[in-house]
């Protein structure tokens, strides 16, 4: 194992942050030509919260579906 086991909710939040970085740096900046992380406007932070909420809820669903 590379890293120690983490609580499901931390994994979910980190997954959301990873998606946020992918969306706002890789997709928006590199592919669409927009400023990195949209120049850190208010939408950037709202997007971070939304992606973290998505990651949390995804981890919660996986947790309950697998009976952990």
Image: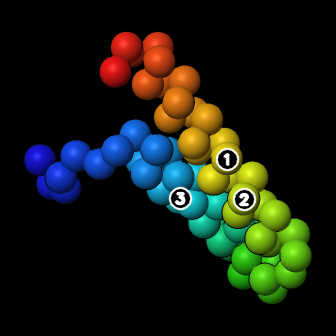
Label 2 vs 3, first from the N-terminus: 3
Q: Residue furthest left?
A: 1
x then y, percent, for residue 5? 22, 46
Whether residue 51 sits left or right of residue 3 in the image: it is right
Q: Is residue 53 above or below residue 36?
A: above
Displayed quadrant of residue 36: bottom right
**Marks 2 and 1: in contact by CB < 8 Å?**
yes
Displayed quadrant of residue 37: bottom right
Residue position for label 3: 18
Label 3 – label 1 distance at C-alpha: 12 Å
**Marks 1 and 3: in contact by CB < 8 Å?**
no
Whether residue 3 sits left or right of residue 17 in the image: it is left
Q: Is residue 10 above or below residue 28?
A: above
Q: Is residue 54 above or below residue 19?
A: above
Name the residue located 43 percent from the left edge and 25 percent from the top edge: 63
Label 1 – label 2 distance at C-alpha: 6 Å
**Marks 3 and 2: in contact by CB < 8 Å?**
no
Q: Check disc 1 and report its element: helix, strand or loop.
A: helix
Residue position for label 2: 49
Foreground mark, 2 or 3, reads: 2
Label 3 vs 1, first from the N-terminus: 3
Q: Which mark is residue 53?
A: 1
Q: Is residue 10 visible?
A: yes
């Amino acid at each position: 194992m590379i890293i120690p086991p983490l609580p499901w909710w931390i994994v979910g939040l980190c997954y959301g942050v990873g998606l946020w970085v992918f969306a706002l740096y890789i997709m928006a900046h590199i592919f669409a030509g927009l400023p990195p992380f949209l120049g850190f406007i208010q939408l950037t932070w709202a997007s971070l919260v939304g992606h973290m909420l998505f990651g949390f809820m995804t981890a919660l669903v996986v947790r309950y579906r697998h009976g952990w």
